[in-house]
């Protein structure tokens, strides 16, 4: 009987020590300096792409860049594909340029 109590006591002590350890880790992981900051931070520049089919033989696609701080939008890349109207070609190519150097 004494041995059975010792087993249960050891199990309870182990369980409570585990719970205290988990609570301590959870508290330490949640302690950040920006815990009160509720604003979303996705970065200043957002890249978006688009595409459409112009006819059964081809279409056009591209990408634009948005400055989320000022609201400016710049076209980064535009290209046709297929037979629109004759062959595919690049219309706008501002890749590898900084945002301020891209023409509006």
Image: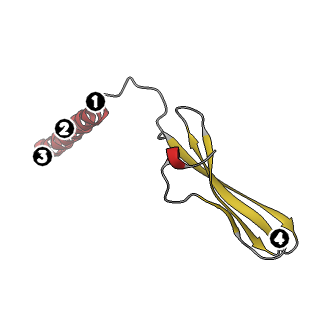
The C terminus lies in which quarter of the figure?
top right
Rendered residue at 16%/40% (across/down): 5
Query: Residue at label 2?
Result: 17
89 and 18: which one is in front?
89
In terms of sequence position, does the residue under pointer 4 or pointer 3 come before the other? 3
- Label 2 or label 4, whichever lies nearer to me, is 4
In terms of sequence position, does the residue under pointer 3 or pointer 2 come before the other? 3
Count neighbours of disc 1 (C-alpha within 10 A) and say few if under 14, some if 14 to 19, many if 20 or more.
few
Q: Tell me the SS state at disc 1.
A: loop
- Calculate the distance from the C-alpha at mark 3 to the C-alpha at mark 2: 21 Å
Q: Of the numbered discs in the image, which one, if any, rests on residue 31?
A: 1
In terms of sequence position, does the residue under pointer 2 or pointer 4 come before the other? 2
In terms of sequence position, does the residue under pointer 1 or pointer 4 come before the other? 1
The N terminus lies in which quarter of the figure?
top left
Residues under numbered marks 2 and 4 in contact, where contact means CB atoms less than 8 Å apart: no
Q: Tell me the SS state at disc 2.
A: helix
63 and 103: which one is in front?
103
Query: Residue at label 4?
Result: 84
Q: Is residue 80 above or below residue 73?
A: below
Query: Residue at label 3?
Result: 3
- Calculate the distance from the C-alpha at mark 1 to the C-alpha at mark 2: 21 Å
Q: Left or right: 1 with respect to 49? A: left
95 and 19: which one is in front?
95
Rendered residue at 28%/30% (across/down): 31
- Label 1 or label 4, whichever lies nearer to me, is 4
Q: Left or right: 102 with respect to 52? A: left
């Amino acid at each position: 009987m004494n041995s059975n109590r010792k087993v249960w006591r050891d199990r309870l002590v182990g369980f409570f020590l585990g719970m205290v350890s988990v609570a301590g880790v959870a508290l330490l992981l949640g302690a950040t300096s920006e815990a009160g900051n509720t604003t979303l931070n996705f970065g200043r520049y957002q890249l978006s792409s688009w595409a459409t089919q112009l006819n059964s033989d081809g279409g056009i696609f591209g990408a634009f860049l948005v400055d989320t701080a000022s609201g400016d939008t710049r076209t980064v890349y535009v290209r046709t594909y297929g037979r629109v109207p004759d062959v595919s070609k690049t219309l706008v190519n501002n890749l590898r340029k900084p945002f301020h150097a891209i023409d509006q």
